Amino acid sequence: MNTLRAHRAAIIVGLLALATSVTSLGHDFTYDDRYVILWNDLVHHLGGLGALWKQTYWPPIYGGDGYRPVVMTLFTLEWVARNGAPWVFHLVNIVLAVATAVAVRWCAAAFLPEAGALVAGALFAVHPVHVEVTGNVVGQSELVVALCVVLAVGFYIRRRLAGPLSWRDRSVVLALFAVGLFSKEHAIVLPALLVAAELTVARGESLRARIREARPLVLALVAVVLGYLLVRGRVQADIAGFQPFPVFRFLRLGAVNRTLTMMTEVPRIARLLVFPTHLSADYSPPDVLVANGFDVSQLPGMMITLGVLVLGIALRRRAPAASFGLLWLIISYLPVSNILVPAGFMTAERTLFLPSVGVVVLAGAVAAQVLQFGTTLRTWRVVYATVGLLVILGVARSVDRQRVWKNNGVFIDQLVRDAPMGYRAHFVRGRHLAMIGDHHAMELEYRRAIRLFPYDAGMTVTVADGYTRAGFWKPAADLFEWTYAVEPMTGQGRYMYVYCLAKLQRWKEVREQAVAGIALVAPADVKLMHRAVIAANNALRDGADGHSDTLAFRGNSALSR
């Protein structure tokens, strides 16, 4: 009984996290799960474990982005455990979600009163924006990173408040940091979070003494980062790890316009973190406004950004826990904000999982302050009632949102309803319809996507590829031509373009495009291009109509995911 009473807060938080995620146990592999796990033979047997450390997170055929060998190892073990049964993967997600929520409460309890820590843990456990992470199997990378970072920060603060760090203490932090880094790049924020803790909730002796005390850990953290970059660099040379989002890449947005674009998104991000009533797996133009210089629509985002930063600094001494929450939010969101480097998305709910820790810590700090200085029972009741209502609403919204991730069909239909003005939502649905053979509905969705935003060359070449497979030669050729006007140096879809031109008997263009494409296509397609040149020469010489049959239709596609 005493043990239960001592761990009551942790049990409450764990049960809340379980309530919001347990319904995902019956889900299938959905959306990115299918590319990273279901169709990735490398994670289907233990013999591939070594190779996972030599390959990117996304298989090369789907872009070769990211480097997350620890999570890929987990996927392999989960697949082998029950021969690829989806429930095993979702069970691991649920366990990690519960563990992370409990860890958030434990971390917050290092510098907040028990009531404030409970508020932080409970709100984190039921936050609806987390469903994209808990309901989708590939969200395991976010879960592992968050668990490692939260445990490392909580352990560091507790040991610092107790006295100088031992080498054993440093080793625990370093081990968690290494596991987090090799699970997802986002763990790189840990050293900055430790600095923020030193400036706020872990303050003690003089600054000079703290710098001297921190030096061994800093050097060790740098060594871990260098080791990570060395291993990762053998697999992926690009420091960012992911191709920039098509809007940044194909519209050639510089750092200024990219930052201004994100300023229009800041109010939406704030709403998702504080009041997540509307959720979506897609945030893309024209729903997201792309900046072309300064506009007044960016002012609210600028004011929110500046306000959070100023408040985080100003509260450092008066309310260190609140300050730490705000600094956590800034630090953990910055790498995925598209401000430092262009990311592979504009706004994504999964990237708010770790930043939301800062938001709930702030809420816990505010609740603790009100309870501490509240002089009447009525004030306490208002606080408890407010938190209770938020928890109930959070559980209800999360459970309702979980059903969206049940399977690909449910998810993709809901995606278009959630983001009717997002071009990628219609593109994804069109690609799904192409896979199940509904070519009429596919064309309608593809047309909507292109009408909303025609400047994504990765999308238009994939649409053209879909048209080719459906036998729509003329619209396919037109789209290929548009694609190469936007992105002239890409080799994607070049052979399919030549194949379409042959079907249309435009032999002179077949020869021109095949010759030009030889220098751009992957080695596997070079022979196909040579055959196309020969077929075009024969057709032009003989005036024959049947030479398109000599070109092989490329059955597999490595086009944009």
Image (cartoon, rainbow, N blue to C red):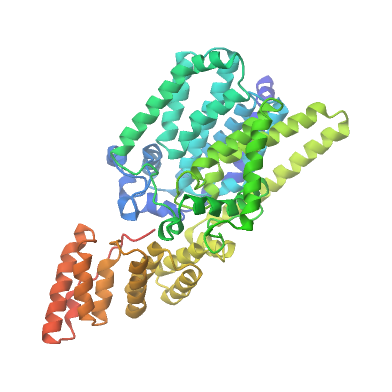
**In front: 466, or 11?**
466
The image shows residue 510 at horizontal and vertical percentages of 22, 75
Residue at point 62%, 39% (across, down): 125
Residue at point 65%, 24% (across, down): 111
Q: How many marks?
A: 0
Viewed as shown, does residue 305 lie left or right of 477?
right
- Residue 420 visible in the current orientation: yes
Residue at point 23%, 66% (across, down): 517
Q: Quadrant of residue 9?
A: top right
Is 519 situated above or below 441? above
**In front: 278, or 483?**
483
**In front: 280, or 454?**
454
Is 388 situated above or below 153? below
The image shows residue 76 at horizontal and vertical percentages of 36, 42
Quadrant of the image containing the N terminus = top right
Instruction: Work out which residue is located at the far front of the displayed protein and give it.
Output: 293
Q: Quadrant of residue 240?
A: top left
Viewed as shown, does residue 274 lie left or right of 561?
right
The image shows residue 385 at horizontal and vertical percentages of 79, 40
- Residue 14 visible in the current orientation: no
Is 255 situated above or below 309? below
Residue at point 19%, 78% (across, down): 549
Is 94 situated above or below 216? below
Q: Quadrant of residue 252?
A: bottom left
The image shows residue 460 at horizontal and vertical percentages of 39, 67
